């Protein structure tokens, strides 16, 4: 079912896919790379067909690959059989996945979000680590959150590292980008609780009352929420540290807050 077979590492399509590891190239093309048959299948099942589908011979015949091929062709995309060397090149991994998809980025406009569709939404201010971001998107998907909102200058949710960490949830959770000012104006109309975490907060996360829909607002890995962003929250809480560690990884802390805010 492939349109063609490519064996050369200098093929223009191979070069173009490999270049998508660079944010500049992703921004200019509006495309990104997702690796693995599981993630590609998640994309297809949520209505996101690949623009380019690359696969190795070892994946040939897999029923999920055939479904992905059909979806790619139906959407006008291209299906290419490639060598293991090419898969390693485009994924920059020694042991690459047998399937790689190139997809179009999709962002949702802030004003298009409907607070009533989910019990919880997540906002992140200046998150820097793509692994954290991807894990948070995956957690938001698992918890049934309505969207992940990136406030200010954040890392790219469509980087290869972030997409890997989402395990396919990048296709299921609306991703929104907003400046601090736009987010502050939009937040003023939020119908439920806006919840932040602060080291200086006096109330523990499990002691607070949260009105749904909850908007969990988390700061970046180094500084947490700035005073200006913390002032946008209705409720500021802390997650108690019971051992020697004085803080949690951002994605872990966000997961705790999501489930605290959505507890019955």
Image: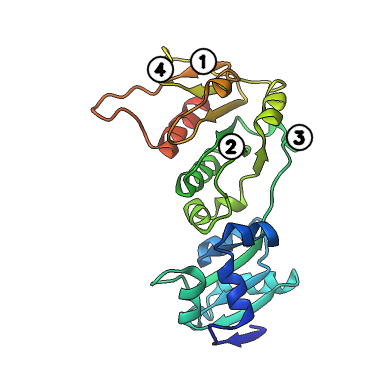
Residue 111's mark?
3
Q: Are marks 1 and 3 in contact (CB under 8 Å)?
A: no
How packed mark 1 is, by other alpha carbons closer than 10 Å (few <14, some 14-19, many 20 or more), is few
Structural distance between the alpha carbons of marks 2 and 3: 17 Å
Residue bearing mark 2: 145
- Kind of element beneath mark 4: loop
* Of marks 4 and 2, the one in the foreground: 4
Tell me which numbered mark, 4 or 2, is placed earlier along the sequence: 2
Residue at image location 60% in from the left, 30% down from the top = 119
Q: Quadrant of residue 22?
A: bottom right
Q: Residues within 10 Å of mark 3 (few under 14, many from 20)?
A: few
Query: Left of 113 or right of it: where is 25?
Result: left
Q: Residue at x 31, y 24 (%)?
A: 241
Q: Is residue 178 left or right of residue 203?
A: right
Q: CA distance from mark 1 to mark 2?
A: 18 Å
Residue 107, x across and y down, in percent: 69, 48
Quick one: quadrant of the N terminus? bottom right
The residue most toward the front is 24
| Foreground disc of the pair 1, 3 | 3
**Disc 4 from disc 2: Cα separation:** 22 Å
Q: Earlier in the sequence, mark 1 or mark 3?
A: 3
In the image, farthest residue toward the left: 244
Which residue occupies 69% across, 62% down? 29
């Amino acid at each position: 079912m492939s349109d063609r077979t490519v064996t050369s590492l200098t093929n223009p399509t191979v070069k173009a896919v490999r270049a998508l590891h660079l944010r500049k190239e992703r921004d200019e093309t509006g495309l990104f790379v997702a690796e693995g048959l599981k993630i590609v299948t998640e994309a297809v099942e949520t209505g996101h067909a690949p623009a380019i589908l690359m696969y190795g011979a070892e994946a040939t015949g897999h029923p999920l690959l055939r479904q992905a091929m059909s979806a790619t062709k139906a959407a006008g995309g291209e299906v290419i059989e490639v060598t293991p060397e090419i898969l390693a090149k485009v994924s920059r991994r020694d042991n690459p996945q047998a399937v790689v998809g190139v997809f179009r980025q999709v962002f949702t406009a802030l004003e298009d979000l409907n607070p009533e569709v989910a019990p919880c939404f997540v906002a992140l201010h200046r998150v820097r680590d793509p692994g954290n971001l991807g894990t948070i998107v995956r957690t938001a998907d698992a918890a049934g959150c309505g969207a992940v909102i990136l406030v200010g200058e954040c890392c790219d949710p469509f980087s290869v590292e972030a997409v890997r960490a989402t395990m396919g949830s990048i296709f299921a959770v609306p991703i929104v980008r907003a400046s601090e000012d736009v987010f502050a104006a939009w937040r003023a109309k939020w119908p439920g609780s806006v919840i932040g975490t602060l080291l200086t907060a006096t109330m523990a996360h499990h002691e607070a009352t949260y009105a749904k829909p909850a908007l969990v607002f988390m700061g970046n890995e180094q500084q947490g929420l700035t005073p200006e962003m913390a002032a946008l929250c209705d409720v500021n809480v802390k997650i108690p540290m019971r051992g020697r560690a004085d803080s949690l990884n951002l994605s872990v802390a966000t997961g705790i807050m999501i489930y605290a805010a959505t507890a019955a």
